[in-house]
Every structure is written in C-alpha cells, then in structure tokens.
Image (cartoon, rainbow, N blue to C red):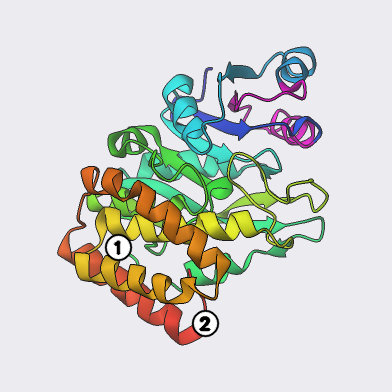
Amino acid sequence: MSAPRDTPAVGVVIATRDRAPALATTLGLLTALPEAPEILVVDNASTDGTPDLVRTHFPQVRLLRLPRNRGALARTDGVRRIGTPVVAFSDDDSWWAPGSLARAARLMRDHPRLGLIAARTLVGTDHRPDPLNELLADSPLGRDPDLPGPSVLGFLSCAAVVRREAYLQTGGFHPLLFFGGEESLLAYDLAARGWGVAHCREIVAHHHPDRHHPDGHHPDGHHDERRPDTGRQVRWRRNDLLTTWLCRPYPTALGRTLRTAARAARDPVARQALREVLARLPAAMTHRRPLPPELEADLRLLEGRASGDGHAR
C-alpha cells in the first residue's frame, strides 16, 4: 500500500471467529475510510463462512486463516503478517472514525518513543463515551513532554494503535493469557522497555457490541459488558492473577492469590479462577519478568486511585 511520503503507512488487524454479519458491517466502514488503510482479517478457525465472506465481498481485504482459535494471539499473527509500521486493532464489532488513523500515524511519526495509542471509545449508535475514557484522560501518571497525551497503563484492544516495532519487541499479547484482560500486561511490557503508552482523545474508535450474540462475548476475547458471563468473569480474574505472577513482586502476587483462595469457598468464580491459575502457575514462573521499580511504583499509584474511586481498572 502506498501512502503520502510524510505519513507512515497504517494497517488494521481484525481478529474474528464466527461473527460474519458483524464483520461485514465493520469491513464496510473500514474500507470506506479516506485513509484507505491496509486491512488484514485474521480468522480464528471460523465455521460460519467468514473466509468466504471476506474473499467474495471484500476482495481488497487480506485474509489470514488460522487452523485453530488462538484468541488474542491472532492479533500478533496479524501484526507479523501485515508489515505496516503502524497497526490499529479493530474487533469485528468496532471500527475507526474517519481521519483517526491518519492522525494516529502522524502522532507515531512525530513522537518516536510512542509505542501505543489508547484511543477514545464511543459505544453504540448513541455514541456513548466508554467509562474508561475518563480514567485514561485523568491518569495520575501525568504527561511526558515527548508524548502526545497522558501516560497510561491500560487500554481497550479494540481501540488501540501500536507501533509495529514496539509491539513485536515485547512479543505482543502474552500466550499464557489467551484472552480476557490481556491488555494490561502488554502495556506494562511496552513501558518496561521504554516505550510510551499514551491516551489520545482525538483518536476515536467506535464500538458496537452485540447483545444478541449467543455466548455474550466475542471468541477473540472481546465481550459485551451488558450480559452476565461466568466464563468471562473467570477468565478476567484468572488473567489478573496470572499477570500479577508474571511481573509483580512475589508478596503482591501471593497476597492476591491468598485473598482469592479465601473467597473460593463461597464464590464459584473465584474457585474456578484459582484452579486455572494454579494449573498455569509453573508456566507463569518460567515466563516471569519483574517490572522495573519505577514502573511498579506507577502501578501502585494507579491502584491507589482505583481503590479510592471504586474502579478496578
């Protein structure tokens, strides 16, 4: 794909599984963007004709078929394949506002340390601001002079733009997490390597979750928050604990695990999450990479705010 000489090429990677109708809407909107981004659909072994849909109705869109569902890791497969220096992620029910990808590419060009942009997310047909927007905009981590927005350590995967070099340097989303809260560890890994993670409110993603999807969540890892989903709760709690074991101090990880164990007798979600954590703990110890002290201090600052205002993120 060619691009103006002063604007880095930008691509969009979409991981999907068995969501052909929603994907068709998303591709229709993305292919109409004035930026004309390169688009790659990574199909997580769909059985509903998703590959045929892409080939027949969107021949300009590239397709990568995976032999099995790789969850969030499909995004990493896509980043490796697409090759553009700037990559935006969409889910099969999310897309980018016109002009946002061009602005994101310019921000990446003008801020060489910027590794990830956490965009502003608007939800549904009434364009409701996602509650995370306010938390990101009011980040207590402040704003570094070489970044275009406040520094953050969280984002929504369906509303993120990454510098390909930075993303691949970290290895992308962690294989032990599969999906469900996989964003946090990637943000930590980027920051630990010196890359900036910033919220840029002028970059806008639209998210239209489907309340009628039979499982209440997207098989690539994105979920509809309005539907009760015990499996989702287990995955999020499991991955929160695994992330702690993968990079936080041992006393922090042990304390959180013991608190989960204390709840397990009366809480089936905590009980199942604990089982899954213990089964994966040897692998987590093998992949453990403690965070630098200054980054650990930033996380404690964020956790202090979260405990004060009632938000868990």
Look at the picture and state if 310 lies above or below 36: below
Q: Which of marks 2 and 1 is nearer the N terminus?
A: 1
Look at the picture and state if 158 lies above or below 71: below
Residue beneath the point at 28% across and 53% down: 246
Q: Residue furthest left?
A: 293
Q: Distance between the residues labelled 2 and 1?
A: 27 Å
Circle 2: is it few (<14), some (14-19), or many (20+) Cα within 10 Å?
A: few
Q: Do the numbered discs 2 and 1 sit on residues whose CB atoms are within 8 Å?
A: no
Q: Nearer the viewer, residue 287 or 126?
A: 287
Numbered disc 2: secondary structure: loop
Residue 232 figure quarter: bottom right
Q: Nearer the viewer, residue 30 or 131?
A: 131
Q: Which of 67 and 117 is in front in this view?
A: 67
In-image side of 7 versus 231 (left or right): left
Give the residue number, with chain letter if any, for mark 2. 310
Residue beneath the point at 24% across and 52% down: 192
In-image side of 145 versus 134 (left or right): left
Residue range (magenta): 22-50
Look at the picture and state if 29 lies above or below 313: above
**Visible in this render: residue 140?**
no
Amino acid type at circle 2 is: Gly
Q: Nearer the viewer, residue 253 or 5?
A: 253
* Residue 117 percent location from the top left of the image: 45, 50
Amino acid type at circle 1 is: Asp
In-image side of 247 versus 147 (left or right): left
| Residue 28 drawn in magenta | yes
Circle 1: is it few (<14), some (14-19), or many (20+) Cα within 10 Å?
A: few
* Residue 107 percent location from the top left of the image: 43, 45
Give the residue number, with chain letter if any, for mark 1. 144
